[in-house]
Amino acid sequence: MELRQTRINLFILTLVLVSIGMVMIYSASSIYAWDNYQDSFYFLKRHVSFLLIGAVIMFLVMSYDYRRLEKYAKPLLVVSLILLALVLIPGIGREVSGARRWFRYKFISFQPSELASLAVIVYVAGFIKRRGNLIKDFWRGFMPPMAVLGITVLLILAQPDLGTSLSIAAVVFMMLFVSGVRIRYLGSLLLASVPALYLLIFSVPYRRMRIMAFLNPWLDPKGSGFQIIQSQIAIGSGGIFGVGLGHSRQKLFYLPAAHTDFIFSIIGEELGLIGTIGVIILFIIFIQQALKIMKNAPDRFGYFLSMGLILMIVLKVAVNVGVSCGLLPTKGLPLPFISYGGSSFIFDMASVGILLNIARVGDYP
């Protein structure tokens, strides 16, 4: 029964973050929605539909014994890899701004890399549980998850999506490190990947521009540095108490993606330093409660599954906040539970459902 209160706390925190997201999505998108769709509630109504789907999935996952996921880890992984391959085919996958990352049907879009992230986490958690002490062996404990990670990353890079690839790789590396994989294996692979990462960044013009804009956005204030500058103006304009809910000026066609990737900047402008610190504190408490669930997981699979899910949420929060504040190069990772978005939001809700399920099974094994 000790995890019952933790489950309640995690659920309430999720509800609070989602509620903040709905308010801020409407505030950040209403004028843009009216200008483009003659409906100021356009994005809010779509987000509510994502919320309903995510809530249903969360409750379904919460009532389904997470231990059964281990049995379906490989089929889930195969399906996600097939979808990653299909999305690259013209006419099947939808291309936006040169990237082919989505399946689209009417107002519903689906990003298979989100499913792939979950599938890889489930597979690696199950692999660590099955292999036990063999995890220290190079061929039997290190190479199989690296092969799975390599195939997944290559397919996501082909979209192209470097940020999601790095996020999945970072989560898997941390899971394997905690599981006991020899540090020299991980270190050697990291060193070997540095030249490839350098080429992926500096041989692609738009990625190179992002790095240059991160280092000095004022070199190209109307081009590659525009988003970073406008984001910093938004956060700086808010001061301590903000300009007031709904009174953002940067959302008036100055800050691109105000309701998605840069919603934290609008929070900073409208609710000020107090608002941004409040949101960060909510995420810290959320992670604290999730870590309690991980610590009390009833088995090794639940422990590493919850670890992977928590790490993915932490990375998304850290990257989104870091980008908004100009501490990291621009990368389109949404703020969990708050940003407007379909697949990412739904899979974040599914992650909460799995964590709640692990806590429930931990209370009643």
Image (spheres, helix red, strand yellow):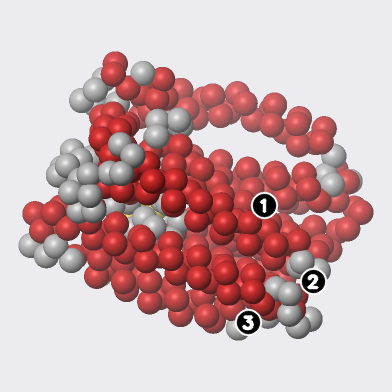
Distance of label 2 from label 1 (alpha carbons): 26 Å
The local secondary structure at tag 1 comes to: helix
Rendered position, 129 above or below 65: above
- Give coordinates of residue 49: x percent, y percent: 32, 73
- Residue plotted at (31% across, 44% down): 241
User: Residue lying furthest right in this view?
Assistant: 133
> Amino acid type of disc 3?
Tyr
Q: Residues within 10 Å of mark 1 (few under 14, many from 20)?
A: some
Distance of label 2 from label 3 (alpha carbons): 15 Å
Q: Residue tagged by mark 2?
A: 298
The local secondary structure at tag 3 comes to: loop
Quarter of the image where the C terminus is located: bottom right
- Give coordinates of residue 165: x percent, y percent: 54, 44
Q: Nearer the viewer, mark 2 or mark 3?
A: 2
- Residue plotted at (85% across, 39% down): 182
User: Residue lying furthest front in this view?
Assistant: 241
Drawn side of residue 348 relative to residue 99, left or right: right
